[in-house]
C-alpha cells in the first residue's frame, strides 16, 4: 500500500514539473534523465522514505513509455489523507478488536 502511495506522489511531483505547455517532451526527457534527483526531491517535499520508492531503472523504463506525464489526473490529497487514516488508524483498530473477541 505504501508503494502505491509513493507512486502516486512521484507522478504528482513529476507532473507538476511539466506546468508549461511548450517543450513538454524535452522537459519530460530531462526529468527522466535525472530521475534519482527527482526521487530525492519528491521524498523531501512529501516526507516519503526513499526505501519505499520503486527500482530506478524499472521506473525510468516505465516513464519512457508514457507519452505525456501531464495527462495524468491531479493527485487527490484529501483521498490520500483518508487512505492514510484507514491504514494507520482504522485497520489497526479493527485488528485489535478482532484479537479481543
Image (cartoon, grey):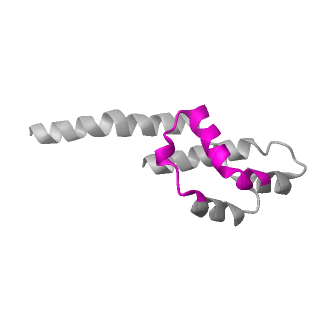
Check if residue 97 falls in the magenta segment. Answer: no
Identity of the residue drawn at 52% across and 54% down: 54
Check if residue 52 falls in the magenta segment. Answer: yes
Q: Give 34 or 78, whichever is nearer the viewer.
A: 34
Q: Is residue 65 above or below residue 44?
A: below
Identity of the residue drawn at 67% across and 51% down: 35
Report the number of discs.
Answer: 0
Question: Toward which corner of the image does residue 43 lie, by quadrant?
Answer: top right
Q: What range is drawn magenta here? A: 30-56
Q: Give 95 or 10, whichever is nearer the viewer.
A: 10
Magenta stretch: dominant secondary structure: helix
From the viewer's perspective, tell me whether residue 21 is left or right of residue 88.
Answer: right
Q: Is residue 22 above or below residue 64?
A: above
Q: Give 94 or 28, whichever is nearer the viewer.
A: 28
Identity of the residue drawn at 48% across and 40% down: 49
Position in image of residue 75 (x %, y %): 62, 42
Q: Which image quarter holds the C terminus? A: top left
Position in image of residue 11 (x %, y %): 64, 49
From the viewer's perspective, tell me whether residue 73 is left or right of residue 92.
Answer: right
Position in image of residue 47 (x %, y %): 53, 33
Q: Give 15 or 52, whichever is nearer the viewer.
A: 52
Identity of the residue drawn at 61% across and 41% down: 40
Amino acid at each position: 500500500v505504501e508503494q502505491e502511495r509513493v507512486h502516486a506522489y512521484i507522478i504528482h511531483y513529476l507532473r507538476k514539473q511539466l506546468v508549461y505547455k511548450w517543450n513538454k517532451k524535452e522537459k519530460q526527457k530531462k526529468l527522466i534523465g535525472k530521475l534519482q534527483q527527482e526521487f530525492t526531491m519528491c521524498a523531501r517535499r512529501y516526507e516519503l522514505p526513499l526505501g519505499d520508492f520503486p527500482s530506478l531503472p524499472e521506473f525510468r523504463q516505465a516513464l519512457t513509455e508514457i507519452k505525456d506525464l501531464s495527462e495524468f489526473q491531479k493527485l487527490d490529497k484529501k483521498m490520500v489523507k483518508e487512505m492514510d487514516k484507514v491504514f494507520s488508524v482504522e485497520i489497526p483498530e479493527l485488528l485489535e478488536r478482532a484479537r479481543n473477541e
